[in-house]
Image (spheres, coloured by chain):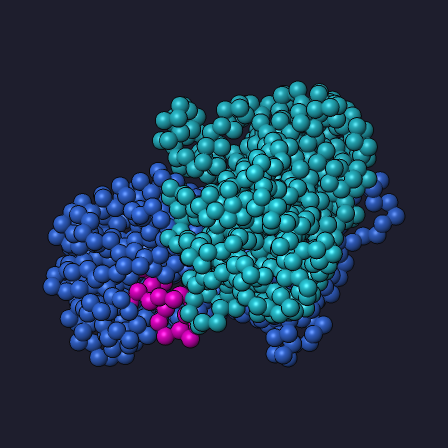
Chain colours: A cyan, B blue
Amino acid sequence: MKIAIAQLNYHIGNFEENFGKIKHAIADAKAQGADLVLFAELAVCGYPPRDFLEFRDFIEQCRQTVERIAAEANGIAVIVGAPSINPRPEGKDLFNSAYFLANGQITHIAHKALLPTYDIFDEYRYFEPATDFATVPFMDRRIALTVCEDLWNVGNDNPMYRSCPMESLSLEHPDFLVNISASPFDYGHAADRIRVLKANAHRYGKPIFYVNHVGASTEILFDGGSLVVTGEGAVYDELPYFKETVKVYDLDAIHAYQSSDKVQPKDKIALIHDALVMGIKDYFQKLKLSQAILGLSGGIDSALTLVLATRALGADNVKAVTMPSQFSSEGSVSHSQELANNLGCKMETIAIKEIYEVFISKLAPFFEGLSFNTTEENIQARVRGVLLMALSNKFGYILLNTTNKSEAAVGYGTLYGDMAGGLAVLGDVYKTEVYALCRYINRDAEIIPLSIIDKAPSAELRPNQKDADSLPEYDLLDQVLYQYIEQRKGPKELVEMGFEKALVDRILRMVNINEYKRFQTPPILRVSPKAFGMGRRMPIEGKYLS
Amino acid sequence: MKIAIAQLNYHIGNFEENFGKIKHAIADAKAQGADLVLFAELAVCGYPPRDFLEFRDFIEQCRQTVERIAAEANGIAVIVGAPSINPRPEGKDLFNSAYFLANGQITHIAHKALLPTYDIFDEYRYFEPATDFATVPFMDRRIALTVCEDLWNVGNDNPMYRSCPMESLSLEHPDFLVNISASPFDYGHAADRIRVLKANAHRYGKPIFYVNHVGASTEILFDGGSLVVTGEGAVYDELPYFKETVKVYDLDAIHAYQSSDKVQPKDKIALIHDALVMGIKDYFQKLKLSQAILGLSGGIDSALTLVLATRALGADNVKAVTMPSQFSSEGSVSHSQELANNLGCKMETIAIKEIYEVFISKLAPFFEGLSFNTTEENIQARVRGVLLMALSNKFGYILLNTTNKSEAAVGYGTLYGDMAGGLAVLGDVYKTEVYALCRYINRDAEIIPLSIIDKAPSAELRPNQKDADSLPEYDLLDQVLYQYIEQRKGPKELVEMGFEKALVDRILRMVNINEYKRFQTPPILRVSPKAFGMGRRMPIEGKYLS
């Protein structure tokens, strides 16, 4: 038997385009002699469709698209993910389902039982968990057909669910497992995925075909990396990261495979780099936009963002703007120009001193006798925001936000100023990781001028300002932030780990009192297991640790 | 037996303050002769605690606070809501529990079974649903103790859950029902609540004591309205809306009650008014802020916001600013001044023409040959945003956003301009409801000048601009928006209802392509069953209907 995996990039609610891609991949797989072709979880409507699932019309369009796909399932069987309607009045109205299509018909529907409802996932918001399970007969074999999370409850010390669908399915002695997924990227996820599939192969002793999404849905990135694992738990193949691929496998060859894992390198920084480039590219493509704009400060965050943007969109499609003030260092313009030249990118310069001074003069009657403070700093940042948004509005550029995760965490940024933008490229990348990404980009040549990388971080909003005046050193800050945000360690645990109590209290307080700022920031490309945004939901006026 | 209901205003994560309030209410109830006092769902930590629940330290503080409350339960029993730890490894790590405290001890814990995971609710994100149920013995009686949603699955045509906890509990023949809730306000919710409790009383034939939160958790408002319902389904008492109250009831008197429902008036507009005032007040109080600022345009939205703010914070604590441009009508300043005078509020004037012109001159090299369009309009709105935020930063005022729901829906507003602010007061109030609120405020005297109410809505960002140039008439717009947003009617259903197809397509497209704007707006005080924000989750780059 030959089985094809179609790892595709779907667009939420773009039924016509998704159908077109699926149809094309079915034809491709058939041409390559496949008996069965696999598409991902909710491939028909894209993932995550969110509250579109509450519209009957949307569900109807899903159904119609499944029927159009079924009509293509001739001479080849198809497995594809789409919502289906729960026929019982009790429970949620929908299931998250895997459709088995053969001979032009829907011949079987398997529903997802384990509904991820944590981090960025809201599946129990929409779906009823399955309670009945049956294998799918196909060409004298039985397939254990599961959806994503249904395979993730195996061998866990502290399983998140009471049930395990594969335990039920295994009673019917399936010949192989199919898992259709929409499993978002983070820098550790490809390794996790392999670990979980291997655990299933060891437990059930059967080959597994795993198909994932690839591409970005705004902040949620999918890396692909679909897998074929043998019944002995060896990785027979891992599909490319960040790339649409259709590939056909021979079941006999998988059974016969006795060698070691065929996997790709999983360098954290390289993965983040590729994920961010894809995230920018897909955001623009799916919104039918082409041109980006960003402010270059002469610092490392905007430099890195510019490199990533040019790689995603092409240098011709990215406009860099430098907006020096009286507090800007000479390098803020010259280093920015050097970078833009290296990238072949056009840079404009708009001095903000005059605008800033008009604001100050208009506010003088109110501010009389009060000294320069963050108010005046914020005015500069906001003047830059207004200028960038004006260029954005006039020419259709999308403003890229360059705030990094360390700054976003502690609120070191100006709302409506440097926190503005349509998409936050680095909002899930700690400052120390920003440095690592720059070194990665410069591994063969000095693309980002060393003058930018080596200077001490500064917002340049007052004379001789340095980030270190207001914040702990980034090496230390990022360690505490990682333990608090990603690992959810509380204050006592952090102190037990060896961090100073005063430092811990200061940082946790900064994080918590700045929820109001993060509430209003653009979507952040998610590359870690815990990004700001939908995956981290905090009360604005919570008193805890603030 | 005497039973007290303590309807209190809790602060998320403020264990010390919540404990203090609970302790005080226990003493109060005891002094009034109560045998049992009831506190709301998750009273110990406030609702919704969101991802604080993922911190072991937070859960530990909940536990310690429950133990401190137990120590107060002497000579009186206490029911109070708090999370508890799921002792089984399988399933989520927590339950959403009702603790029964007596003789200084925890004597019973009942867990919530039906976990709302829709709209603003994310309970399955954190909690495992209960599967075992037992009544609580107390003073020769048996109490069916349930948490919020557990009573909401009765007599529904299309129930959201497969199970019904009260069906299990009723097998033990309870003498009365207790339901501890955190049931957020919307303008129809008090009536819904009564309907559901009556349905339970009719089904189980026993009195019900229902205790709710009162107060605001940022955007989520609780109106109180706790209830006592007789076994025959009559409302014996409904506690006040928007007010902390402790009240004691005699069970015998409830059994003897034969009269009709004692309920409060439920005028939609009056409820919205009171809810918004409470929402502003609590936002400031819980964040330890006192002063607000807002821009007065001379239009109805900012006028209404100013009235609500002065009612919440006092006229001395609200700073109004008018920022006329060359496009502003004469009335924009004079009508605003008249309103400020009526309210006893101080108003400042800052003309923006000069600042606007500096921006335009700085952008002239880029904009050469291009005509005036929304870019220049947005610059004006953003200049005002920068000025308001500068005053906010310098003096600690919190900027109130004045965008209404109709504008937010169709994206008729400027990001970082009039869409800026710490809290959006009217973001869940349609334009037609804004008018109704103004008439309500003026019911006895002309507080909001009729000149403001009667003028045609205009952003005044270009000569002779009117909202009606860009938008359908509000009467019609709001009807379509309500059906699409609150009622989740799709395009075909809307046309079937009699709306013109071209109009429907235009409005739905405007709503959907502006998700990116709403993603970055301040928290919106929720007064309807479907507000923008956490309760409505839409993909930014979804293609559906856009």
Is residue B164 located in the magenta-colored stretch of the structure?
A: yes
Q: Residue A89 or B362: which is nearer the viewer?
A: A89
Q: Residue B491 or B434: which is nearer the viewer?
A: B491
One can see residue A539 in this view: no
Q: Is residue B366 left or right of residue A262?
A: right
Residue stretch rendered in magenta on the structure: B147-166
Is residue A162 located in the magenta-colored stretch of the structure?
A: no
Q: Residue at x 42, y 75 (%)?
A: B157
Q: Is residue A196 left or right of residue B214?
A: right
Q: Is residue B69 above or below residue A31?
A: above
One can see residue A230 in this view: yes
Q: Quadrant of residue B1?
A: bottom left
Q: Percent position (x, y) of residue A278?
A: 68, 42
Q: Percent position (x, y) of residue B262?
A: 29, 74
Q: Residue at x 62, y 55 (%)?
A: A1
Could you tell me what secondary structure mostly forms the magenta stretch?
A: loop
Q: Residue B322 or B525: which is nearer the viewer?
A: B525
Q: Percent position (x, y) of residue B2?
A: 16, 63
Q: Residue B495 or B456: which is nearer the viewer?
A: B495
Residue at the far right in the pictured view: B369
Q: Percent position (x, y) of residue A60?
A: 60, 70
Q: How many marks?
A: 0
Q: Is residue A169 left or right of residue B362?
A: left
Q: Residue at x 30, y 65 (%)?
A: B165
Quadrant where the C terminus of chain B sits is bottom right
Q: Is residue B180 above or below residue B59?
A: below
Q: Quadrant of residue A90?
A: bottom left
Q: Residue at x 53, y 62 (%)?
A: A136
Q: Is residue A53 left or right of residue A493?
A: right
